[in-house]
Image (cartoon, rainbow, N blue to C red):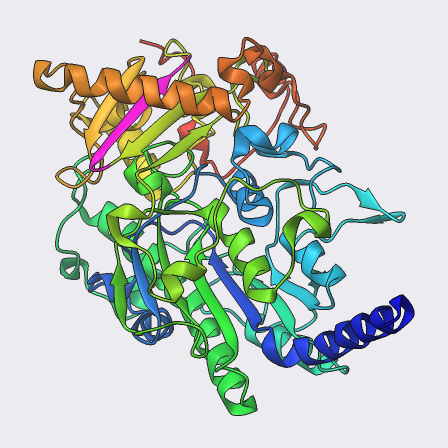
Amino acid sequence: MTMRYIQFVMALAALVCLSAAPADRPNILFAIADDASYPHMGAYGTGWVETPAFDRVAAEGILFTRAYTPNGKCAPSRSCVLTGRNPWQLETAVNHMAPFPAQFMTYAEALAGAGYFVGKTGKGWGPGDPGMRDGKPRQLAGTPFDRRRAEPPTSKMGATDYAGNFEDFLAANGEGKPWCFWYGAVEPHRAYEYGSGVAKGGKALDSIDSVPGMWPDDEVTRNDLLDYAFEIEHFDRHLGRMLALLESRGELENTLVVVTADNGMPFPRVKGQVYGPSNHMPLAIMWQGGIAAPGRVEEALVNFIDFAPTFLAAAGVDAGASGMAPMTGRSLLPIFRGEAGGADWRNHVLLGKERHDVGRPGDAGYPVRALLEGDLLYIHNFEPDRWPSGNPETGYLNCDGGATKTRILEMRRAGRDGPYWRLCFGKRPAEELYDVRKDPWCLENLMADPGYEARAGEMRGLLFGALAAEGDRRVAGDAGWFDGIPYTDARTAGFYERYMGGEALKAGWVEEGDFEAGMLD
């Protein structure tokens, strides 16, 4: 057998594999809500949120109970999804409103290079600067399909017809390629139309079984929660339309559907922080052609950095050959096949943040690293003298403005805030420890309990060792580098100094009454 004949056979085999690949490779629908915490989907038993589409995905696939994003803020969390790497491994993409580094390819770009038809609707990666490629802004999550508009249920929801745009995307796939689509709702991000959950969603204030102890249990907070629920339901309705469309086209069976949210709910002490509900995300995954024993509830500890390696593995794309940087996450395919899962899958996840929004002197962030292992969450606050939700005199701008936030600050001014202001906006100790099973909202710090001293020490050592192994500058003697990352919008740079100097500025979702000049005690 001659070498030329061997080369011919190998080339022919490659062509056969290439031509067969589109039928074998699954389509991928990634649906991500904007600011929704676990367990606020119907499948988890939350009765005041109705999510039939999410519940269907869970019932026909896998419902995950321990899924975490490494960073509880929009852009850094989405960076982890797209790259399969932890935020401190992503250079400037560790921060909110920052440049996305050119050296990191996203799974969407890798799949496009491997023959997938790739698109998105709504919110993709951001806010920040995606950078340029071939003289055009990079499309980190796929080519935008945002033409269709529809009247939203409230004045504060987005007018994007997500499902209609998904239909346009499918119609544009003239070559019948396998496809990958990012459905990024802007709901339930604030602002909300106050009272819409009751007035337009038909909800009742007493349908909420309990209000977490860091917020006052009153009509204001309950309305705020129901408005949040009504926005989640808007996200779910469009997901339901997408599933129905795929079913009508005969494409649902070979579509890997992943439904989650980017970070925790936009309420005080949640979004932008590093507590249980800040990083603990809803997650349901279905794939009729690729998940064994559907209808399972999976307690494996999974991480947002697992999505990119999962999508590439399902598509048969070699990550290294595609140009992706080495990924820290791992493919979930063994869980899909029933070959792995439970407590043996992963024994801990790393969480953390650097700078999110504006409002501190010198554009400083609030650096945190944390380790979740078993039922315990260990948190290390590197700068406990800073205000964790942003400075009072500039409006606590790492907490979106809204009814619950304003209510707590009104109570603070009246001297009736009880524990609420301290828990949501007060300064924190250098170390915190919580039992997330007994205390899912992370209200009781166990660091002062002598019974946990040894365990906290073990977790501290594991955390810092893991961060050092991943090259985290925060523990490698180069901590100041993070605060030097530029903002992508020049109007946000130097916000604190300009605002305190009398310049009229507005940033973030903030009510006028949230600016607390003089309340530094």
Count of numbered tags: 0
Quadrant location, the C terminus: top left
**Looking at the image, can residue 81 be seen?**
yes
Q: Is residue 483 magenta?
A: no
Depth check, front residue: 15 or 196: 15
Identified at 73% across, 53% down, the residue is 139
* Image spot of residue 297 (x, y percent): 25, 63
Identified at 32% across, 69% down, the residue is 58
* Image spot of residue 83 (x, y percent): 60, 45
| Picture quadrant of residue 339 | bottom left
Residues drawn in magenta: 374-382
Depth check, front residue: 419 or 501: 419
Q: Is residue 445 toward the left or the right of residue 39 in the image?
A: left
* Image spot of residue 207 (x, y percent): 16, 62
Look at the magenta stretch and give its main secondary structure: strand
Q: Is residue 469 toward the left or the right of residue 55 in the image?
A: right
Residue with the most extreme front position = 1
Q: Is residue 391 toward the left or the right of residue 404 in the image?
A: right
Q: Is residue 246 above or below residue 282?
A: below
Identified at 81% across, 75% down, the residue is 9
**Looking at the image, can residue 388 be seen?**
no
Q: Is residue 199 above or below residue 411?
A: below
